[in-house]
Amino acid sequence: MNASTRGGHPAPTNESTPAPDAVLMHPDLAANWSLWSGVVSQAALTRLRHLEERFPELTTAVLSTADGLHIASVGTLGETGERLAAMNGSLFAVARAEAEIISRGTEPSLSAVVSVSIGQSQLSLLSFILAPYGQLLLSVSAKGVQVGTVIVQARSAAYELITALGLAGAPG
């Protein structure tokens, strides 16, 4: 008789079901994304508009999932926001892979901040994890300011998004 069975039933184990990966979107949310995306998008758009009002140098701000699914954006035309979200997902994946190589795997690369400077234009792309949405990306671009200013504004907006979306009533 197999030691792991007793009377044809599996023996009880002390192993608990693994906790869901916080980087991934909650399965119930993902399965009903067409329903939830409207709620999440409106809550996020309100916060991105706050950023636009207090940061006049802003040219674009895009919130997306880490795999490039557009959630909300300001300063873009509809399709451009979706394209930028997809490119942000790719840019972050490359940056994360490079960060893992540079740190030799000793530092978590999920929190890498990517900054791009081209002439007077600056871009900051940062990541944050927010259950149940998983890993989200926020890119903020501006003109005529230092990249540090863009990073500070992006972090402030990310904090507002975490506060707002954490209270949006998604499944727990």
Image (cartoon, rainbow, N blue to C red):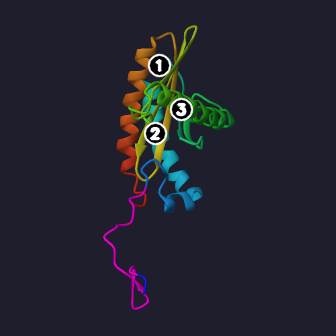
Furthest residue to the top?
119
Residue 46 circle label: 2
Question: Viewer-nearest of labels 2 and 3?
Answer: 3
Using a 10 Å C-alpha cutoff, classify the residue at mark 2 as few (fewer than 14 neighbours), some (14 to 19) or many (20 or more). some
Q: Is residue 12 above or below residue 124?
A: below
> Real-space Cα distance between discs 2 and 3?
32 Å
Q: Which residue is mark 3?
A: 97
Using a 10 Å C-alpha cutoff, classify the residue at mark 3 as few (fewer than 14 neighbours), some (14 to 19) or many (20 or more). few
Q: Position of residue 164 (x, y in %)?
A: 38, 44
Furthest residue to the front?
1
> Real-space Cα distance between discs 1 and 3?
33 Å
The residue at 45%/26% (across/down) is 113
Q: Which residue is mark 1?
A: 56
Taking depth in this image into account, of 106 and 95 the one nearest to the observer is: 106
Let me know if residue 46 is in the magenta part: no
Label 2 amino acid? Answer: Thr
